[in-house]
Image (tube, helix red, strand yellow):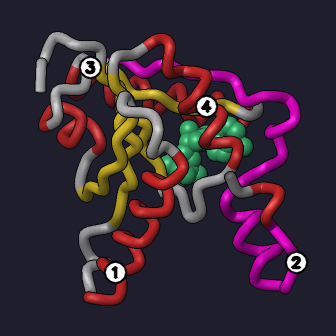
Amino acid sequence: MVAMERTAIFPGSFNPFTIGHKSIVERALPLFDRIVIALGYNESKNSADDRAEREARVRIISGYFQDEDKIEVMSYSGLTVDFARRIGARFILRGVRDVADFENERKLADINRELSGIETVLMLALPCHGFISSSMVRELRHNGYDVSSYLP
Ligand code: ADP
């Protein structure tokens, strides 16, 4: 790993990873040498089942980008900036759908910069992805709706 290369992490829960997430990664790709999609999890969720579910999710996301060698998928627990530093990332990539996202992301970006000096790069969601969220997909799926059009 070369520390000077422009590495960004794209952190999130990705439960599940949607076409909105995929679009952010693809559109940010020209800005970076490497993007690590970083699936964050809570330390307390570490049963064998949790681990298996997480590994499955990492495998699914990796599958979406198997032809793109600038993209990696990893999981991490703990602070995002600590993980970013561990892998030599100088940037955090995040997506913004609306004003609520923006306010949230601004606070996160400020605290992360304060903690580590790592800068956050915000990419605007495509208008057609503005209403797509992982929680909406989970809710629809739970109620028996076909969610395939929201998944890569
Ligand atoms: P988190 O729990 O950290 O918010 P998510 O998996 O929900 O994780 O989202 C990860 C990132 O992707 C966030 O920056 C979020 O704003 C962004 N994002 C979520 N849905 C979309 C979408 N439909 N279009 C663009 N960006 C999105």
Is the CB atom of the residue marked by disc 1 within 8 angstroms of ligand 1's nearest atom?
Answer: no
Q: Position of residue 130 (x, y in %)?
A: 81, 38
**Which mark lies nearer to you, 1 or 3?**
1
Confirm if mark 4 falls within 8 A of ligand 1.
Answer: yes
Name the residue nearer the viewer: 152 or 96.
Answer: 152
Give whichever of discs 2 and 1 has the lower sequence position: 1
On the image, the x and y values in percent for residue 83 come to: 21, 42
Q: How many marks?
A: 4
What residue is rendered at 71% in x and 57% in y? 151
**Disc 3/disc 4 C-alpha distance (Å):** 18 Å
Residue at 80% in and 39% down: 129
- Mark 2 residue type: Tyr
Q: Which residue is mark 2?
A: 145
Q: In what quadrant of the picture does the N terminus appear?
A: top left
The residue segment tinted magenta is 119-147
Q: Amino acid at mark 1?
A: Ala
